[in-house]
Each structure stands twice: as C-alpha cells, then as structure tokens.
Image (cartoon, rainbow, N blue to C red):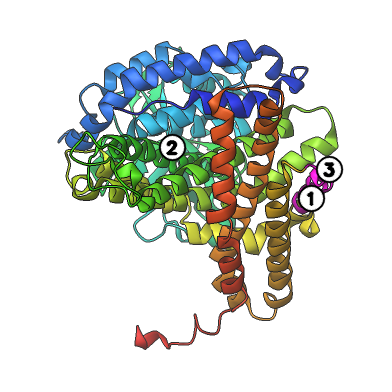
C-alpha cells in the first residue's frame, strides 16, 4: 500500500478542534467554507496519492542528472507531474489574489502541503522554494518587482530559489563573500559561488528566479552589510517573458544521502545581472521572511515523512506473520500471528501516532495564528499571532524534524531486515527525513534562537502569553471528569516548562554556556508541552462527539491514542527538565584537544 493522505485527520483539526468556520468573517476564510475546504483536501489527496506518490521511489532511484551545458534533467515523470500541479492551481492556493493567488488561509494550504511532502518530499521542494521566493519579494520588493515576478511565482509558472550558503559559510552568513557591483543603470553585477542550492537548476519551469545574498562593495562587515538581489536565470524582456540568458550557472549537483529527486546545486554567478530588493544592507531582514516560512515548511516535512513512514510500517505490521502473541495465538489457523500482537511493535507504532497527531495539531494551530496575524481586525489578536509565530517557529522546526526522523527510524525497525533493503520504502523515508534536521538552520541553531532571542523578545511577552493561555484552559476545563487526565497532564508539563524557563532566566546571563547546553532540552520540553496542549484540545473535541452519541470509531481511537501520549510520551518532559538544569559544567569540561 502506498501513502494515503490523512484527510480525515485534517478535517477533524480544521472543523472540530480549530473551528475555522468561526473565522468566516475574515478575508480568505470567507472564501473557504468547510464544504469547499473538504473538496480541496479531497482533490489534493487524490492528486498526491495518484500522481506524486508513485514518483517518490522513481525520484529516489533515478535522481537528477547534471548535463555538461549546466542544465539539469529531473527524474522521469517529474516534469509532467509539475505541469499537472501548476495547471491544477495548487501553487496559488495560499498566494494573495492581487498577484494571481487564491488567497486561502495558510492553515488550509498547509494541509495540502503536508500531503504533497509526504507523497514526494523531493518533488514538493520545487514549488516550496518558489513560494518562499514569492513571499520574500512580496515582503520587500518594489511595486515593479511585485508586478513582474509575483504572478509567475504565485502560480508556479516560474520557479524560485534562495541562494545563501557559500563554501566557507552556512549558518554564519556574516562571512558571505559574493559581491555586488553597481552597474550604473539600476542593476548590479553579482559574482560569487553558492552551494547546496535546492531547486537551483531544473527543467520544470521556463525560468528560475534566484534570490541571492551578496555584499555591495564598501558595505559594513558582517551581517550588517548584506543585501538581497533578484537574479533571474533568464532576464525578463519588455513583455515579461524569459529573454536573454543571465550569467548564472549550475556547476554540478551534490551527491546526497536522500531527496535525490530534488536538484541540490552548486551555483556560479559570474557578473550576473541582479536587482536590489529593498534597501542596501537590509537583505537579511527580507530573507528571514523567506527563511522563517521555510522553517515552518521544514517542520511540516519532518511530520510528513514521519506520517508516510508510519503508514508503511503499520501496513507491514498488519501483513507480516512472525511468532505468536505472548498471551496465546491470535491467528490460530495461520502459521504465525501478525507482528502487531507484539507489545514492542505496538509501542513503536503508538509512539509514532501520538507524536504525529499531536504534532500535526500543533503545526495547524500555529499556522492558524499566523493567519490571524495577517487577517484579524483586532490589533491584540494580530500581535498575539505574530508573537506566537516568532516563538514557535524554532520549536516546530526542531521538535517535529527530530521526532519525524525518530519515527522513520522506528518504522525501519518495524520492518526488520526488510526495512534495510531497497525493496521496501522504509529506507527512503529515513534517508529523506534526515536533512530536515539540518537545513534551514540546524536544530541546534533553532534551540539557540529559541532561548537566546525568542524567549526574551518584548520582555518575554510571547512565552508568558502562551503559558497564560494554558493556565486559562486548565482553569476552564479542570472540573470536566472525562478530560481530567489531559488537563492534569497539561498542567504538569506547563509547570515544568515554566520551571525550565525561569532556570534559564536565572542561570543563562551569568554563564551563557548554561543556556547553550540546555537549549535542545528546553526546545524538547517546549515541544512536548505544546503537544500536551494540543492533545487536551483534541480530547475535548473528540470527547464532545462521543458524549453526543457519535459512534464513529475515529473519535474513540483519538482518545485512546491521547491516553497513550499521556502515559508513554509526555513523561519525557521530566528527563528534559532534569538535563536542562544540569547546566554546562559536564558539557564543557573536556579540553578541546581531548576530542
């Protein structure tokens, strides 16, 4: 069985948990009643399952091919699938109508993106990077740049990338050497080499718009002197069509562990023509619009690959006959029982479901707040949405990618020796998911960003608002006997998160290594607390359905998985807090030459 998009899960979250119909008076939401949303998700699921998923293994086995002229050929079937993707209007779902988009809420678009990423992560990166370029130009481009580029990027007619990393710098963008020289006609000559550029060259679209970080001659050193430029593969002519070839070229492709179907390129800019986006030396601020969106997308990728891996493992476990149940045969007429009878197999599958269902809710809940930040008329609601998006982006990226990879690893374990072969999909999910912990800011960087920047921003306003919201939920639902285990679990996790937050505030300033050494544990603690809140919200929604007499087994299963989360996943908060409070002494004790 190939991947089956979890539309039922999406509808439960959107309709019953997040209740997006209550926002029908807001722009975008007014154009997306639930019956239309359901149709969109069903059609997206069909496209992903029937078109994209069958190409996943094809892309993994064939990969992309670099040609001597610098062009790149994508795997068989990708070009035709991309044309169907664009013709179906899928890239435009979340783009603004002013520039050819459909203007739907980001949370609805996220559901579709999860399905496409789970179906074929390498393929989905092409339109994903394009939407990131669209977002950056929308945020910082001139009116002329928006009019020229956004309609083509929004619809997927043209592709897009971001060119950040160079051989000598990745995370430390202050070390960038690519230079930009004014040409005297309003353009710049861009020269330098960029590496690890996802979707940097391909045959899916007639033009690719590169967003390139470079340093204008005489600019300040470090990150204060970085500017952002639009560098098209083909220079648009007077009618806005691809014209003369620009002097930007793919020098080769990286040999990678996974995502073989996506072209990861070494790009050379040799006095390429570029146009400044925004102000000189302010490029990083605009690029972070793109990067923050990409980080949420990478968190979604971790979730999506975990979901696909879980589905494959669950199907294998149902079909694989091996041994007998400890409590006696469950398949007495067969040679053996399915491995689903074994508690350890159940443990791995239940771990996966508990994290995936809670993680998806956390991702969707956060995306909804992102929508409210842009669309709600109340300034306080918009501010809260902005605060939450800033605070939770590193949590979602770091936590979901780490857990997604762990789920893919457990999925291989469920497959046993079969999973270590290429006859089953487990190995591809494991290989593909691993990059998500690294790119768009490695998870350790996300943790440092969380404790070093996001916690203290605006006097800690965002984290205090989040903790207060949990307190309000606990107070409101504490008397509900059916919900009590979830409320108690949430209250306990919140108390530990508060304790960890206060410890960092007290011990970080005196020795910054204390914050650094505990940052990943704090991120995990935050992620688990977020999932505890989501499971409480889901349990309330599912419990209300059951109490009203709804016999759909979906709701009973939801409550069962939620109880597993409380008993077998949430206790990890205690270990995270204990390690966090150990500080940096043991971490930093060995001298450098002892490694």
Position of the C terminus, as image quadrant, is: bottom left
Which marked residue is nearer to the observer: mark 1 or mark 3?
A: 3
Q: CA distance from mark 1 to mark 3?
A: 16 Å
Q: Secondary structure at mark 2?
A: helix
Query: Is the residue marked by circle 1 packed among few (<14), some (14-19), or many (20+) residues within 10 Å?
Result: some
Q: Which mark is residue 93?
A: none
Nearer-the-camera pick, 288 or 6 = 6
Q: Residue at x 57, y 52 (%)?
A: 394
Magenta stretch, main secondary structure class = helix
The residue labelled by disc 2 is 304
Residue 584 x %, y %: 56, 80
What segment carries the magenta color? 465-480
- The question of residue 469 being in magenta is answered with yes
| Residue at x-position 46% and y-position 49% | 351
Q: Which residue is under mark 1?
A: 465
**Crowding at mark 3 (Cα within 10 Å: few <14, some 14-19, many 20+):** few
Element under disc 1: helix
Q: Are marks 2 and 1 in contact (CB under 8 Å)?
A: no
Q: In terms of secondary structure, where does tag 3 sit?
A: helix
CB contact under 8 Å: marks 1 and 3: no
Of residues 148 and 459, which is closer to you in this image? 459
Q: Please tell me in which quadrant of the rendered image residue 590 appears.
A: bottom left
* Label 3 – label 2 distance at C-alpha: 33 Å
Q: Specify whether residue 555 is in view.
A: yes
Residue drawn where x is 45% and y is 12% of the image = 239
């Amino acid at each position: 069985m190939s991947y089956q998009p979890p539309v039922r899960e999406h509808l439960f979250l959107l309709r019953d948990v997040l209740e997006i119909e209550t926002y029908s008076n807001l722009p975008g939401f007014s154009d997306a009643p639930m019956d239309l949303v359901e149709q969109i998700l069903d059609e997206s699921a069909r496209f992903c399952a029937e078109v994209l998923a069958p190409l996943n293994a094809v892309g993994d086995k064939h990969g992309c091919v670099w040609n001597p002229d610098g062009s790149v050929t994508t795997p068989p079937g990708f070009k035709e699938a991309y044309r169907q993707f664009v013709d179906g209007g899928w890239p435009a779902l979340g783009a603004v109508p002013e520039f050819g988009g459909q203007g739907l809420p980001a949370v609805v678009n996220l559901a579709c993106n999860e399905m496409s990423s789970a179906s074929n992560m390498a393929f989905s990166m092409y339109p994903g990077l394009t939407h990131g370029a669209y977002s950056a130009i929308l945020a910082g481009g001139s009116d002329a740049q928006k009019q020229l580029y956004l309609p083509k990027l929004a619809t997927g007619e043209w592709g897009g990338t971001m060119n950040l990393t160079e051989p000598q710098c990745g995370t430390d963008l202050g070390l960038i050497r690519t230079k930009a020289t004014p040409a005297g006609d309003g353009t710049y000559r861009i020269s330098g080499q960029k590496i690890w550029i996802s979707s940097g060259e391909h045959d899916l679209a007639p033009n690719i718009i590169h967003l390139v970080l470079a340093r204008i001659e005489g600019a300040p050193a470090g990150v204060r002197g970085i500017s952002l430029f639009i560098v098209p593969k083909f220079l648009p002519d007077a009618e806005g069509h691809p014209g003369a070839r620009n002097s930007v070229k793919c020098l080769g492709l990286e040999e990678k562990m996974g995502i073989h179907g996506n072209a990861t390129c070494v790009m050379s800019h040799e006095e390429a023509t570029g146009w400044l986006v925004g102000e000189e030396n302010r490029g990083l601020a605009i690029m972070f619009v793109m990067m923050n969106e990409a980080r949420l997308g990478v968190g979604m990728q971790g979730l999506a690959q975990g979901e696909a891996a879980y589905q494959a493992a669950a199907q294998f476990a149902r079909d694989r006959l091996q041994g007998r149940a400890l409590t006696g045969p469950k398949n007495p007429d067969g040679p053996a029982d399915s491995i689903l009878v074994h508690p350890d197999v159940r443990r791995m599958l239940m771990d996966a479901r508990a994290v995936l269902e809670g993680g998806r809710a956390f991702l969707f809940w956060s995306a909804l707040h992102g929508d409210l930040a842009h669309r709600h008329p109340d300034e306080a609601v918009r501010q809260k949405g902005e605060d939450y998006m800033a605070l939770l982006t590193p949590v979602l990226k770091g936590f979901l990618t780490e857990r997604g990879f762990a789920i893919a690893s457990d999925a291989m374990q469920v497959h046993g020796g079969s999973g270590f072969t290429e006859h089953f999909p487990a190995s591809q999910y494991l290989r593909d998911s691993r990059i998500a912990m690294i790119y768009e800011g490695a998870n350790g960087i996300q943790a440092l960003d969380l404790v070093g920047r996001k916690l203290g921003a605006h006097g800690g306003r965002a984290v205090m608002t989040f903790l207060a919201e949990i307190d309000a939920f606990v107070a409101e639902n504490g008397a509900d006997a059916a919900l009590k285990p979830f409320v108690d679990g949430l209250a306990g996790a919140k108390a530990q998160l508060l304790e960890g937050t206060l410890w960092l505030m007290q011990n970080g300033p005196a020795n910054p290594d204390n914050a650094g050494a505990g940052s990943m544990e704090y991120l995990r603690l935050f992620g688990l607390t977020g999932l505890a809140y989501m499971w409480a919200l889901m349990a309330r929604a599912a419990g209300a359905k059951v109490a009203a007499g709804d016999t759909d087994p979906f709701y009973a299963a939801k409550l069962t998985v939620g109880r597993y989360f409380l008993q077998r996943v949430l206790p990890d908060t205690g270990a995270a807090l204990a390690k966090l409070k150990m500080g940096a002494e043991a971490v930093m004790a060995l001298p450098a030459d002892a490694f």
